């Protein structure tokens, strides 16, 4: 065993023969003598597990079985590389070398990740934009590439914090929202409607932006990448608490609210100082928005709407200061609905607003809530759009919301596909890898086919949204976006089902190698229901198509 000076710990090398001398405390009646240290090699590094063995979640025995050996294959059959990264600095004591060889390493630190390392080389794990040797589609630019890589890098650096919060089952703290706000990440989830305010904040030095881009140059493709990457890197509950309510409510505030305070409110939300959510669903009305019963009656003084009613399943409602709320101001049906911004932080309005947590399949971090309005006085200046004309605004907002849900689905299912391919390459059953079995490759092919088809559909719709005139978009794209959402959630169902079969018991375990699959199989129905259920989406898509059916067409 040789040593060399290095920063931090002294650099040591171990041959296989030297490693075999460090077997720790052996099993009863074992032929090999015990030693003071238990060393195990994984890859090219050697780890001291002497004390860690008592803390190992899988027990001591499994470590004692491979003590003094190269346990790379056994390790990756049970763990992903994140586990190694978590414990490397604490446990690594040297480098494994062949007899008589030297190491070129200067220290024991894991190699720093470069930007190119952030892009997966696993087949179909990335969208076409990031694939080596693939011709770039005309809508993608260098700006999109730089934006995506930098955003991924930032999210990966803080990823452990998100998973700790998810596991702790606690609400997203305002400090986490503020951190993402000043880095411009929250703004990216809200699209073009907030970029004027975001540019002002960046010019004032109060906000940076991923990829160094200027908010004024931000487009719909950046927004697509942001929402897809967020779903890929951040667990669902935390994602819901950070952006799930905001991204479907703030665009409505920015687009439809005609109030001198608007830009100041948008600033506060973008910087994470205040939080917003969308309050539409009720116990009485889910996908059938026209049937809501929460009322808003004009006060005798004419200065307020008095709101009474209840909302349910409101994502991020527990933390929200501002509620973009559907209320009934007129007769029954869609023509009597208005859109109000209800500010809980207002001392008068806040007296009539209360919230209670709704326990769902998702983590508590999503802050899903009941929202109660009891004689809630809302200034008439908080009306968004015109009285009794809110249904059109809500439907327009729904198009954006449904598109966002699809982007999130894309990020989630690609991450799970990558896990499945890696798992099938390293998991051995009956002496062979899973990937060697035709039935396994068939399952992966079904997943790949669904995801790649959906990507093409998604990018086609996004291109239309980015280029079609707004008025035409309102009539032309509502149906196709509904069909897109239907197809996205059906594809997610297929991927979740096949991934569960591939991972087996690990797909039912909320930690370890199958944790992403477990999270998806537990929560994928949220996307299938929120923003309009699959059945409603399918029906809406076909009904909208029939509006332009040529009367004289015959088979």
Image (cartoon, rainbow, N blue to C red):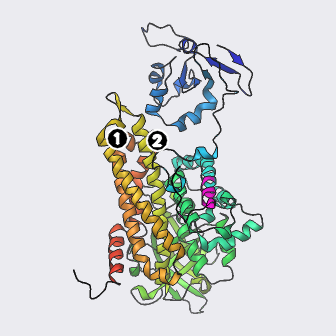
Q: What's the mark number on residue 511?
A: 2
Where residue 332 appears, as percent x and y from the top left, is 39, 87
| Observer-nearest of 550 and 534 | 550
Which image quarter holds the C terminus? bottom left
Where residue 114 appears, as percent x and y from the top left, is 64, 43
> Which residue sits at x=48%, y=13%?
26
Residue range in magenta is 136-149
Would you name the residue on which mark 1 appears?
A: 504
| Residue 3 in sight from this viewpoint | yes
Label 2 residue SS: loop
Circle 2 packing at 10 Å, graded few (<14), some (14-19), many (20+), is some
Where residue 396 appears, as percent x and y from the top left, is 49, 78
Q: How many marks?
A: 2
When asked about the image quadrant of residue 51, the answer is: top right
Q: Is residue 220 magenta?
A: no
When asked about the image quadrant of residue 46, the answer is: top right
Circle 1 packing at 10 Å, graded few (<14), some (14-19), many (20+), is few
Q: CA distance from mark 1 to mark 2?
A: 13 Å
Residue 412 lies, with reference to residue 55, above or below; the image says: below
Where residue 311 appears, as percent x and y from the top left, is 46, 72
Which image quarter holds the N terminus? top right
Label 1 residue SS: helix
Q: Is residue 144 magenta?
A: yes
Residue 440 lies, with reference to residue 29, above or below; the image says: below
């Amino acid at each position: 065993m040789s040593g060399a000076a290095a920063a931090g710990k002294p650099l040591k090398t171990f041959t296989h023969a030297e490693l075999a001398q460090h077997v720790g405390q052996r099993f009863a009646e074992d032929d090999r003598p015990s030693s003071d240290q238990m060393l195990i090699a994984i890859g090219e590094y050697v780890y001291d597990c002497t004390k860690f063995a008592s803390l190992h979640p899988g027990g001591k025995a499994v470590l004692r079985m491979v003590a003094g050996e190269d346990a790379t294959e056994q390790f990756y059959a049970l763990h992903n590389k994140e586990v190694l990264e978590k414990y490397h600095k604490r446990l690594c004591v040297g480098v494994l070398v062949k007899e008589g060889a030297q190491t070129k390493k200067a220290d024991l630190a894991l190699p720093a990740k470069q930007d190119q390392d952030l892009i997966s080389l696993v087949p179909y794990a990335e969208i076409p934009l990031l694939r080596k040797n693939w011709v770039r589609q005309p809508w993608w630019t260098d700006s999109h590439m730089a934006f995506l890589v930098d955003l991924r890098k930032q999210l990966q650096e803080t990823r452990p914090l998100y998973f700790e919060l998810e596991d702790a089952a606690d609400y997203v703290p305002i400090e986490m929202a503020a951190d993402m706000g000043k880095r411009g990440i929250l703004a990216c989830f809200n699209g073009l409607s907030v970029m004027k305010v975001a540019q002002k904040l960046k010019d004032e030095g109060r906000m940076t932006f991923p990829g160094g881009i200027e908010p004024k140059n931000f487009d719909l493709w950046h927004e697509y990448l942001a929402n897809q990457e967020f779903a890929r890197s951040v667990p669902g509950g935390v994602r819901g608490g950070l952006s799930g309510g905001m991204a479907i409510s703030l665009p409505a505030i920015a687009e439809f609210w005609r109030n001198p305070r608007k830009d100041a409110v948008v600033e506060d939300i973008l910087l994470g100082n205040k939080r917003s959510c969308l309050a539409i669903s009720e116990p009485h009305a889910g996908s059938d928005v026209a049937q809501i019963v929460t009322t808003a009656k004009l006060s005798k003084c004419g200065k307020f709407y008095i709101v009474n009613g209840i909302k349910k399943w409101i994502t991020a409602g527990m933390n929200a200061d501002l509620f973009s709320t559907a209320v009934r101001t007129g007769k029954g049906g869609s023509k009597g609905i208005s859109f109000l911004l209800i500010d809980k932080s207002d001392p008068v309005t806040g007296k009539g607003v209360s919230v209670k947590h709704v326990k769902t399949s998702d983590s508590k971090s999503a802050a899903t809530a009941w929202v109660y309005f009891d004689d809630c006085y809302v200034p008439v200046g908080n009306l968004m759009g015109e009285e009794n004309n809110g249904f059109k605004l809500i439907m327009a907002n729904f198009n954006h919301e449904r598109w966002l849900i699809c982007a999130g689905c894309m990020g989630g299912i690609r991450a799970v596909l990558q896990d499945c391919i890696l798992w099938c390459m390293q998991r051995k059953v009956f002496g062979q890898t899973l990937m060697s079995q035709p039935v396994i490759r068939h399952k992966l092919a079904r997943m790949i086919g669904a995801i790649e088809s959906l990507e093409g559909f998604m990018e086609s719709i996004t291109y239309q949204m980015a280029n079609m005139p707004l008025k035409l978009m309102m009539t032309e794209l509502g149906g196709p976006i509904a069909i897109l959402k239907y197809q996205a959630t059906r594809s997610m169902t297929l991927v979740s089902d096949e991934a569960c079969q591939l991972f087996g018991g690990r797909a039912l375990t909320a930690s370890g190698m199958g944790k992403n699959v477990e999270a998806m199989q537990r929560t994928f129905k949220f996307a299938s229901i929120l923003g309009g259920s699959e059945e409603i989406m399918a029906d809406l898509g076909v009904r909208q198509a029939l509006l332009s059916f040529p009367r004289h067409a015959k088979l």
